[in-house]
Amino acid sequence: MTWCRQQGQRGVGWLAKARKDPKATSKPRTNLYDQDEAIEKPFDKAQFVRLLSFLRPYRQTVVYVLALMIVLAVANLSNPYLMKIAIDVHITNGNLLGLSLIGLLLLGLQFVVLYCSRQRTRLMSRLGQNILLDMRAQLFAHIQRLSFKFFDSRPAGKIMVRITNDVNQLNQLLTGGLVNLITDIISLVGITLVMFWMNWQLALFSLLVVPLLLLIATKLRRLVRETWRDVRYRNANINANLQETLSGMRVIQCFGREETNLQHFRDLNDDYKNAWMRAMRINMFFGPSVDITQVIGSVVVYWFGSQLLFAGNNITVGELVAFIGYLGRFWGPISDLSNIYNQLLIAMASAERVFEILDYPVDIDDAPDAIELGTIRGEVIFDNVTFGYNDDRMVLQNINLHAQPGQTIALVGPTGAGKSSIINLVSRFYDPQAGSIYIDGQDIRKVSLNSLRRQIGLVLQDTFIFSGTVRDNIRYGRLDATEAEIIAAAKAVNAHEFIMQLERGYDTELQERGSKLSVGQRQLISFARALLADPRILILDEATSSIDTHTEKLIQEALAVLLQGRTSFVIAHRLSTIRDADLIVVIDKGRIVEQGTHLELLGRRGVYYNLNRVQLLQGEAM
Ligand SMILES: Nc1ncnc2c1ncn2[C@@H]1O[C@H](COP(=O)(O)OP(=O)(O)OP(=O)(O)O)[C@@H](O)[C@H]1O
Ligand SMILES: [Mg+2]
């Protein structure tokens, strides 16, 4: 047919251009890793409250964990104070018994800390996993209900990142960040109060290093985080490049791009190495700077403390030691708090993306009063249907069609004419902007989606093979099918023979969209799948790919079996399929330009006649 030919020529032209000018082919894309999605967002109260609602089912656990953490914070606070008593009261007075008691107390405290920490870790892990599951299941369930419109505008990778990474971020905030927040505040306030209560002058001096700690916790930490993020990006680039290279290997070898690609791969790896080294350098700076600040703090406390001590002020050696102890406990909560703030901003961005999906309306859904479509005869009527994927461009205009039960309707027309769009409407993957579609006299918007789609079998151009065995793939639409039924279906569509030749017959595991099978074999499996489901209406987007004459014949025979006794819409490229159809509908630019039987249309000497003549001529030429 002419349009096939044009398509071919266009294709060849493009290839020729690409071959001449290697630079014209695009470089592997970089920074696929959620590059265009915001990493942080300002705090949003409504969203935050909504996030908290995920904790609601686990209120009891949260309260219990909080209690454990308060115990931990208090234990942490009492430790240096007990040291002070040991030194000032018991060591000074040589009271061995008192000292032993303090020792026992410290030991007991350590056991309490151990127990509480263990409990906390256990509960928090379980809580985290539960929330993760809740969020993911909610998203998954919602996504499965969304119409094609949603998937048209979003690559699968992006949706995946939301279900994995974004949900992880939210979970980290809910189970890690927020619970820590409370105990961190308790610790900080507690330490400050105790210090001022013991000696306010020394307390003031000890707090001198706090601004420095804050600076490290915010500014330096931020730098560290950014460099690691950079490392992650570069790593993602390598992954994306690898993935593209592996899936496009045939084209790469065909165009001899190996050298260029290797260079590009080297560059990406170099980038990664540099980013990693930079991150390491900054990271090595981080730990010591905290240590040095703490040492400076201790020196200040010791120096000023001994001044007070020597001047005979009311300060003891024990207090001095306790102060150092408390100072050492400042860093943990400060570091946590700055982290939580950051986590919060990141979580806000993630929450926005997750909620965007959860709030995406289920625009194709059962009407409130939807009825169940019983077993149908299979009459399909398009009544003046006008449809566009977006409201500003209609791809189908005033389509009127009448398919009698059991008829085969062949849709023909150039690429982009609107053939696939018509069949998308029958299964109600989209709703038309105007007009209606009736099945057995029922407007399909008024019946439940489930009962509608159960009656429709769909065999698409690129047959989708799921990972699993051949058997699983055939009974995909009817899980209760018996072994005999599965084999009968496979036999009916000529698939049985080649399946038996596979290494493990029906138990052969198929992976990666059925890469072990030929295109024709995949098609036969999908025919068997459709036949087994036994739908009243069959929709078939026929593959154009050239297959060997033997398989072609098998498919031809299989098709005849498949079409028998059901209403079928076939987007046909094979002349034989078209010729045998009860009704041929010629579509061009979204309109039906001719319809009738093969002989009627030939007699009319219009578009179809011309298409047919060209294809016959081509056939003769070959
Ligand atoms: N998901 C989509 N979102 C927006 N526009 C779309 C979408 N799918 C198809 N279109 C547009 O709708 C028009 C009709 O496309 P359709 O897929 O129905 O053509 P077709 O006749 O099936 O072509 P082909 O023979 O190449 O499969 C085209 O202009 C196409 O660009
Ligand atoms: Mg199509």
Image (cartoon, rainbow, N blue to C red):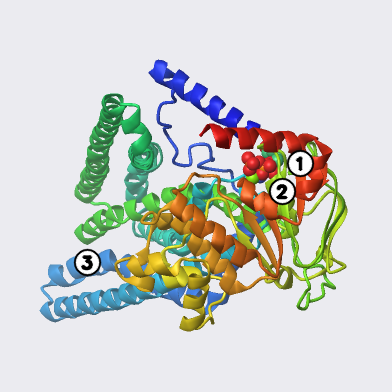
Q: Secondary structure at mark 2?
A: strand
Mark-to-mark CA distance, 2 and 3: 88 Å
Residue 537, percent across and down?
71, 66
Q: Secondary structure at mark 3?
A: helix
Label ID, residue 587 = 1
Which residue shows up at 35% across the image and 71% down it?
Answer: 505
Specify whether 568 is left or right of 331: right
Mark-to-mark CA distance, 1 and 3: 89 Å
Disc 1 residue type?
Ile
Q: Are marks 2 and 3 in contact (CB under 8 Å)?
A: no
Where is 252 relative to 329, above or below?
Answer: above
Is ligand 1 less than 8 Å from the beta carbon at label 2?
yes
Disc 3 residue type?
Met
Disc 2 residue type?
Leu
Q: Residues within 10 Å of mark 2 (few under 14, many from 20)?
A: many
View extreme (top): residue: 20
Residue 183 image-quadrant placement: bottom left
Question: For mark 2, what is the residue?
Answer: 411
Which residue shows up at 34% across the image and 59% down it?
Answer: 198
Residue 237, percent across and down?
37, 37
Is ligand 1 less than 8 Å from the beta carbon at label 1?
yes
Specify whether 218 is left or right of 524: left
Q: Are marks 1 and 3 in contact (CB under 8 Å)?
A: no
Instruction: Report the front residue among 15 and 582.
Output: 582
Q: Are marks 1 and 2 in contact (CB under 8 Å)?
A: yes
Question: For mark 3, what is the residue?
Answer: 83
Q: Residues within 10 Å of mark 3 (few under 14, many from 20)?
A: many
